Image (tube, rainbow, N blue to C red):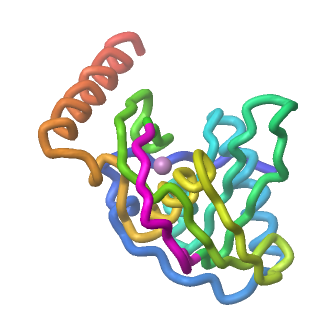
């Protein structure tokens, strides 16, 4: 397994619509393993393939915080939302491609998602609460959408200013 490089805003690959995966084979499974390791290494709860420079419809998610709510990591290939709740929720989101920033984003409170798993088997997941938010955030990446595209222009400008400042500080320290 390997830790992959995470691409950050405003890298153009993050704006691109990702293409469908043709086969879940050993080569793809190796990539899924690398994605999961990269996500854990960066202490994220989800990661989409475009974030590591691969414009394919693949995400990994693990929202467990400790042993108590430990879940098996989700590997989703060609995921598709097939149902959305009428109810919406607002939650704070961050993204490994927009380091150290956070903002409130409105999402559907629950979604049903269809995908191929690690073994290429078709699965349907009913997600609610934080998992539903994570699924929507990661699937957005596959369509070239970042959570900062879903907040007001003013909030986005403020957030990007903070990101810029952070990068300058890091640059000065280096
Ligand atoms: Ni993200």
Residue at left offset 43%, top offset 36%: 92
Which sits in the foreground, 157 or 84? 84
Decide whether the magenta segment is chiefly helix, strand or loop. strand
Looking at the image, is 56 positioned above or below residue 98?
A: below
| Picture residue at 52% right of the left edge, 51% below the top | 133
- Determine which quarter of the picture holds residue 14: bottom left
Q: Is residue 163 above or below residue 74?
A: above
Q: Position of residue 54 (x, y in %)?
A: 54, 66
x, y (%) of residue 131?
62, 51
The answer to which quarter of the image holds residue 99 is: top left
Above or below: residue 139 compared with residue 88: below
Q: Is residue 61 shown left or right of residue 20?
A: right
**Magenta span of residues:** 80-91
- State the residue lying farthest toward the front: 87
Q: Nearer the viewer, residue 53 or 119?
A: 119
Residue 172, magenta (yes or no): no
**Residue under the image location 43 percent in, 66 percent down:** 86
Which of 54 and 126 lies nearest the eye of the viewer?
A: 126
Give the percent coordinates (x, y) of residue 45: 63, 43
Residue shown at the point (75%, 46%) measured from the top left:
37
């Amino acid at each position: 397994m390997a830790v992959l490089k995470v691409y950050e805003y405003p890298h153009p690959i993050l704006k691109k619509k990702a293409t469908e995966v043709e086969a879940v084979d050993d080569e793809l499974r190796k990539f899924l393993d690398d994605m999961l390791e990269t996500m854990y290494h960066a202490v994220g709860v989800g990661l989409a393939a475009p974030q590591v420079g691969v414009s394919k419809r693949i995400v990994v998610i693990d929202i467990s915080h400790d042993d108590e709510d430990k879940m098996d990591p989700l590997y989703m290939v060609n995921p598709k939302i097939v149902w959305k709740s009428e109810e919406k929720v607002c939650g704070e989101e961050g993204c490994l491609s927009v380091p150290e920033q956070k903002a409130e984003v409105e999402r559907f409170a629950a979604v049903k998602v269809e995908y191929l798993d690690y073994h290429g088997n078709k699965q349907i997941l009913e997600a609610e609460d934080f998992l539903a938010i994570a699924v929507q955030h990661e699937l957005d990446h596959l369509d070239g959408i970042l959570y900062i595209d879903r907040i007001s222009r003013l909030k986005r400008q403020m957030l990007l200013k903070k990101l810029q400042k952070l990068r300058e500080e890091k640059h000065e320290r280096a």
